[in-house]
Amino acid sequence: MMAGVGLAGGNMTELTPAQRRAKLRDNQDYFSSKISELARYIGFGLVAVSFGLLSSDSIFAKTLVAESTNPLIWAGLLGAVTVLADYVHLLLGWLSNSQAANNKSGDFKLAGIGKLFRFLQDRIFFYLKQLAPLGGAILLVIAITKVVSGGHV
């Protein structure tokens, strides 16, 4: 088990508020990295499954494409959006931190364009890379369920 998950390593009542907050932030960082990693895998998977089904000659794939072309294409596109959003999220994090690290006159705090980068990173691309794979996975399940439940296979 990862140290810090579930606030392991100490009784919560024995911690000062600052220590408790530090442990909670460690947990938040851990789960954020795992969510990002999983979203990336789902994004690549959606692209691979969609492309594989759209280009396959199997009876199931042909039936699926005939019955659910649009959801299948959208699932693949949302997978690509997921991967792109993940990359841009990381790039914006690097850019905002680079700006702050080079801001000697501002005590190495975010300023100007760095604040914009951080806003886009935290408010747009973080959520986009969570919602896009969820939407793509739902569309893929709908497409497959439509074919399987219709008795076409």
Image (spheres, helix red, strand yellow):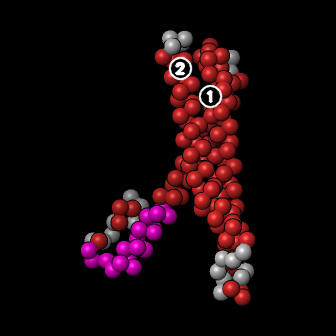
95 lies above or below 37: below
Q: Is residue 71 magenta?
A: no
Q: CA distance from mark 1 to mark 2?
A: 11 Å
The structure residue drawn at horizontal position 66% and vertical position 47%, both measured from the top left corner, is 83
Label 1 SS: helix
**Near-viewer residue (55 or 68):** 68
Residue type for callout 1: Pro
Q: Point out residue 72 in the picture as x, y percentages from the top left corner.
A: 64, 28
Q: Point out residue 68 in the picture as x, y percentages from the top left corner.
A: 62, 22
Q: Which residues are magenta?
A: 13-30
Q: Which residue is the site of mark 2? A: 146
Magenta stretch prevailing secondary structure = helix
Disc 2 crowd rating (10 Å Cα; few below 14, some 14-19, many 20+) is: some
Disc 1 crowd rating (10 Å Cα; few below 14, some 14-19, many 20+) is: many
Residue type for callout 2: Lys
The structure residue drawn at horizontal position 72% and vertical position 75%, both measured from the top left corner, is 112
Q: Point out residue 62 in the picture as x, y percentages from the top left corner.
A: 65, 16
Label 2 SS: helix
| Residue 96 shows in this picture | no
Asked whether disc 1 touches disc 2, contact meaning CB atoms under 8 Å apart, the reply is yes
The image quarter in which residue 9 lies? bottom left
The structure residue drawn at horizontal position 51% and vertical position 13%, both measured from the top left corner, is 150
Q: Which residue is the site of mark 1? A: 71
Which numbered disc, 1 or 2, marks the residue that appears first in the sequence?
A: 1
Residue 19 vs residue 111: left or right? left
The total number of labels drawn is 2
Q: Which mark is residue 29?
A: none
Q: Quadrant of the N terminus?
A: bottom left
| Residue 9 shows in this picture | yes
Q: Is residue 27 magenta?
A: yes
95 lies above or below 89: below
